[in-house]
Image: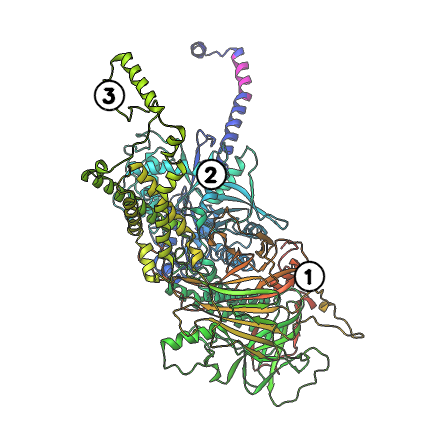
Amino acid sequence: RARAGLGRVRGAGVVPQNSRRGMRAAWPRLVAILAVLAAGHVRAAGGDDGRFGVAECTPSSPCVHLVAHSHMDPGWRNTFDQYVIGSGNGIHRSAVLACARDPARRFTFGDAAFLVRWLESEGGEAPPEDCVYSPTPSRGRGPCGTTWLELFRSLVRDGRVDVVGGGWVSHDEAVTPVHLAAANFDAGADALRAVVGDAGWRPTVAWQIDPFGHAASTPTLIAHLGYTHIVVNRVPRGVRREAVRRREREFVWTRGGTRSGGKVVAHLLRRHYNVPSALDFTGERADVDWTAAAGALEAEAVASFEGLARGAGRAMMLVGDDFRFKDAERTFAAWETLLSRVGSGNWDGDRDWDGNRDGGGRRAGPRGGKRSAFRFAWSTPAEYFAASASNRFDKPLPTRSGSFLPYADNWPVSENAWVGSFVHRRELKRAVIASSTAALDAGSLAALVPNANDVERIETSRAARASYLGLHHDAITGTCPKSVADDFTAWARKGEALARDATARSAARALRCDVGAEHSWTEEHGWTGSDGGAARLREPGDAVAVHNPTGWFLPYAEVRLLVGRRVKVVDARTGRAVPTQERRTDGVRFLNGLLRSRSSRSRSSHGADGEDDERIDGLSETVVALTDLPPLGIVRLAAVAAGDDTKADDDGRYAKAPRRDPAVTFESDGTAAVGGVKMSVASVASPADERFGDGPYVSRSGLWHALPVVVGALVCFVNVTFAAWVAARALGKRRAAVRRRRRRGLLDGASPVKSSKPRGVGGGGFLSTFAARARRFNRYSLTERSTMSKPLATRVARRFAAPAFIGVVLVLFTHLTACVSDASHGAIVRGGYRSGAWIGGAAGLVNAARSRGKGTMGGAAASGCVAALAAFVTLARAPSLSHRGMVGHGLIAPRCFAGEVYTECVARFGTVANPSLPSAVLTVRERTHRSPSVETEGDPVDPRRIRETLNPNPNPIEVEWAAFAPEDVEIVARVAPSNGAASRGLLVDDGIGVTPHAWSSRRGWSVPANELPSGAFVALSPDPTSADVLGLVLSPGSAATSVAHVNGGARLGVHRQAVNDDGHGLGAARRTLVDESPGALSFLVARGSVASLRRLAAESSRPATVASLGALDAACEIAEWSPVAEPLPRHVEVLAVTERAPLGWTSMG
């Protein structure tokens, strides 16, 4: 009616006055409605730029953020260089071009190694001529810019390309020390800032979707570095299931404990980072089943919301896999075709494989062509977290503390821990950690020394990149083929040589030397010598620089040099000779010499102890001890002729201590007592635990591998029992057998005694039968009737005793190494079902013979279950049968040596004459000079040298186990208090704080399920407040190993020999993962408080480094330098230089 009236008024050309007033009154309402709609649009977009539409993302209309990514490991099946040439550069070019073509697309790059290398090698080249940037930017001479670097920076500024992670590589959180993990993040962020072109840019989302578990120190570390969110993936299956059930896949993650530090928001992936095969549009498929793809997309979308908080309207779904998007345009086009078919997104039709519109097509929805309830759009993790934070109106996120170690993903979860990587390839771990530590020290020194030049910055950057590459979760863990492991070792040695060169240049500048240091690395010729560029004092006049990388004063330090026979080492500060001692014993070198001597009998250049060829060159490996190193400073050592007189040692700084043997006792049972602990070494042959080609990934117990055996035993037992029962029926043995009838009760059916009277009919017949039965039943007494039937327990025992006994005996027999060889055992268990069939068949035959075929199918099935259960439990407990202690070799007695620096004793264990059997070498060293410097009365006290003695035992004893394990064997060292008091738990340090650790039945009953990374030190006490704790402070190369609380002490992994992989990524070819180098485990035995152990661990993790200065002794003006005595460069921010905290960490860390 209003429209009609208004039309008549308009036709008359007159507008009524009341209509004008109504229109004026409606304007405010219209403005308010538009404001609400605009606010709703902004609220719904939440940083999405309206890609999900105007409607708000709610549970009834959910939004799914599609994160396109390509997971690229810089070394896994192939080496880093092979991946870069074969896939890496092509994926980056393809993804950048695809994102430039469509503004709705997004792509996420993880880490920095591949990206930086591509931009540094091809960033200056021009993109192809067919490159399209939509919409066309106003800047640049072409639509895509003049270079790849310019195009990449444009996409980053527009938000189409994002970089997450930020580290040079995605490091392994279990075995990487926390300070090296921080250095890895810093190196990656510095490289990314250079390619992005923004000095203040840094990623805020950490991307740890592939490391094998997550450490408790990670949230504190990344929060300290400025990250706000982290995406994690590999957590124990039970943890993921519980997080989904409790809707806690997104949580606030803290370290926990008294030193929790920072916190971050963590997002746990619902499934792995890949997509189902139906959604894997690699560009190589010519046809796509769109119906199956739509169903898979719907299932993945539903799964992406599982475990999120109630009322969540947004979820993140990863699109990609390992080395995907090689043809990114075709992959994006296929996905957009799928999204248009399910009715999501802003696409107006299908795309073909070339990205062209085809005018639409029949929709292939997940529910018979119906429109999907989900709305999809390309996004990045940063956009998802920003949108989720703006749309979160429910209760705050839950809080979770602690680690996700050990990682386990198979059934049973508690018995399938991925702990083999803690021990595998010990020498690779030692090389990577030594190289990374040297690179970190070189970069810190270059930043502290004033007037750094570009050459030093470039060299420190190259050293960091080469060294930190080995921190990747497939490198330091050893989860790669031998060829790739050798390549990682080569990168580590190159990085260490570059770091030494950069340290020498910085030291020469700090000591005001006229000429730069000698080069130790050249691209053309590699290392100068087999030692990888170690510092040398060959001739008089040569000099080396010793750097203290810690932020406090060091009263004692040791370095290793190659020293000529005709020179003496002096301290350039005083001109006095320093204590030196030739390194005579090396367990790893000795075992390597045995292996080489067995493979080549003609070898004559190596001695009995595996000495290197440096003796031929007139140099010997020498340990040099020096005192009073300034914080973050440098001290110069010089070589003088051996016959020259030096100043008298009158101040007691290098006073000689009386020589004595270490306080070590070797027992006949193969144990050694030293420093308050009792140690032994054992070989874990693991016949039912790790004999199945698990390699360094998984350390599985017998439960998983016994399952086929159990099934085979059950099936074959039932079959044999059934066959015996059928045969007995056919031959009539059951009818011919004489049986004694059991007396029946009154209501037990037909009477066992036939009545002489004919059976009645009807009620009378029943009554007469009942009366006759009662008369005959009363003839037997109660006692007589009770003896005619056996008790239930007796009948069950008779039925099940024989199968259980047979199952246990057979399984035990197959696991006794004295009865069955390793090859036979491997064939038995690898046979799985077939082996179980033999066990079940034997048990079935014994059961049939015992019962003479008079069984039933129910009893047979029950007996089979009992036999299978017996085999199951026996196989699960089998690892305890293979733990063999190794006693000392009977022909070689322990030998002790005394020197100016330390005294040492060496003992050999196992069969060192046969490398095919387990062998180990124990070395115990006790220092003669390690004690705090004492200021005499009347002498001026240097305030830098005031040191509070935190350690009540300033002279800890060094213990080094070197071992070589044969195939499928792991060598472990067990350490317990020597007074016989069992430790009720352990304190494991992760670089930030200690975590109590004890045997937990919730983790599982096998040792691998109770293993954790060792960290910086392990204390044999559950009380962190105790002032007298017995601790094991691990050396840098040994800190990445396993520890478990077993039998009242600590069990540490020394060496593990894996044969091949079980298919966890390396393929069905079962590539060899053998470790041909012996492993070593080195630690200091000390007593004191947890704080003193942490201080000792910090000094051990950042030992003094040494670099050659060449023949520059006379060319240097000063002999000692420290940055705390003069102003620091402006670009250096000192967070803490105190007595208790190292540089770069606050009091919390």
Q: Is disc 1 placed on a helix, strand or loop?
A: loop
> Do the residues under discs 1 and 2 have CB atoms within 8 angstroms?
no
Q: Amino acid at mark 2?
A: Val
- Cα gap from disc 3 to disc 2, whole angstroms: 74 Å
Q: Which residue is mark 1?
A: 1138
Quadrant the N terminus occupies: top left
Question: Measured along the vertical axis of the image, is residue 802 above or below residue 989?
Answer: above
Q: Is disc 2 placed on a helix, strand or loop?
A: helix
State yes or no: residue 712 in magenta: no
Disc 1 residue crowd, few under 14, some 14–19, many 20+, Cα 10 Å: some
In this view, the residue in front, 49 or 590, is 590
Which comes sooner in the sequence, label 3 or label 2? 2
Q: Which residue is mark 3?
A: 756
In the rendering, at what x and y percent does residue 172 appear?
A: 48, 56
Segment tinted magenta in the rendering = 19-28
- Cα gap from disc 1 to disc 2, whole angstroms: 45 Å
In this view, the residue in front, 652 or 492, is 652
Q: Residue furthest left?
A: 731
